[in-house]
Amino acid sequence: MSDSNETKQIVKSHYDKVASESRGCCKCSCGGQDENELIAKSIGYSDQEIAMAGEANLGLGCGNPTALGKIKEGETVLDLGSGAGFDCFLAVRKVGPIGKVIGVDMSEAMVAKAQANALKSGFNNVEFKLGDIEKLPIDDQSVDVIISNCVVNLAPDKSKVFKEAYRVLKTGGRMYLSDIVLLGELTEAQKSDETLIAGCVGGALQKDDYIKTIQEAGFQVNILSEDKDISKRQYQGIALESLKIEAVK
């Protein structure tokens, strides 16, 4: 596989392009808005949530972490890899006017798109920051809930991501993840394939290793659900699944 900096550049370039083209999807081939809506439905978003998201739905992700998360009014929510803001805008409606949502993304184009979408929707308690999820621009113990949708698998050093998540969460804080994990071995060619790296597969961990990495960061891990059918729907039958996890500090 590419080294850490090269991998990050592959991912950043891909999602800069996705943002500029208003097309997305955490898979190996992408489509237009109609396909984005179908993808969103297939991974757990309701028609109402999709309608609320509008242009923030780029057909990205492998689950619906805001549906998994028991987000309460007044809480501070952090979205790792916030993209155009889809999950942040759903979370804003749960935290209410006294809560706050922060999105962090490594793509300047995505951050700009999310900020524009927030302005268009009139949200004033959501903030988007440019940053690396391996080194979050967030204060210690300042967040109640972390959500992340098919993003941690894109980070070269997942251990750093989970340690950072643990750092910024308050004691008793929760993290809700939807992520791609491997159920079989990739070939060396697949691991170095730029399309698969940017498409959430090339850098993914084996399921057991992924869970162990979260636990080693200090979290208690609860598996909420597993979607193996996503392999046929979006990933040409590669041995993988979408894993939904609650991790508690």
Image: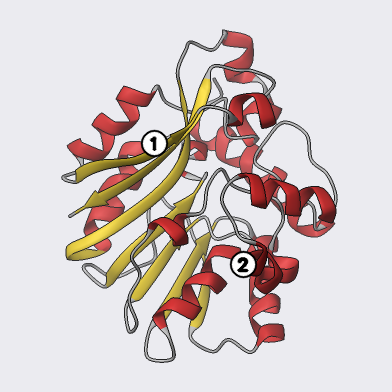
Q: Specify which label sits upstream in the sequence, 2 or 1.
A: 2
Q: Nearer the viewer, mark 2 or mark 1?
A: 2
The quadrant holding residue 52 is: bottom right
Q: Residue furthest front?
A: 47
Q: Position of residue 27 (x, y in %)?
A: 68, 35
In this view, the residue in front, 200 or 41, is: 41
Q: Looking at the picture, does residue 236 appear above or below residue 7?
A: above
Q: Amino acid at mark 1?
A: Asp
Q: Looking at the picture, does residue 57 appear above or below residue 3?
A: below
Label 1: few (<14), some (14–19) or many (≥20) C-alpha neighbours in 10 Å: some
Horizontal side of residue 166 vs 95, given as left or right: left
Horizontal side of residue 156 vs 169, given as left or right: right
Q: Residue at x 61, y 65 (%)?
A: 86
Q: Position of residue 97 (x, y in %)?
A: 44, 91
In this view, the residue in front, 145 or 218, is: 145
**Quadrant containing the C terminus in the rendered view:** bottom left
The residue pinned by badge 2 equals 49
Horizontal side of residue 229 vs 136, given as left or right: right
In this view, the residue in front, 189 or 137, is: 189
Is disc 2 placed on a helix, strand or loop?
helix
Q: Is residue 74 visible?
A: yes
The residue pinned by badge 1 equals 157
Q: Looking at the picture, does residue 23 appear above or below residue 129?
A: above
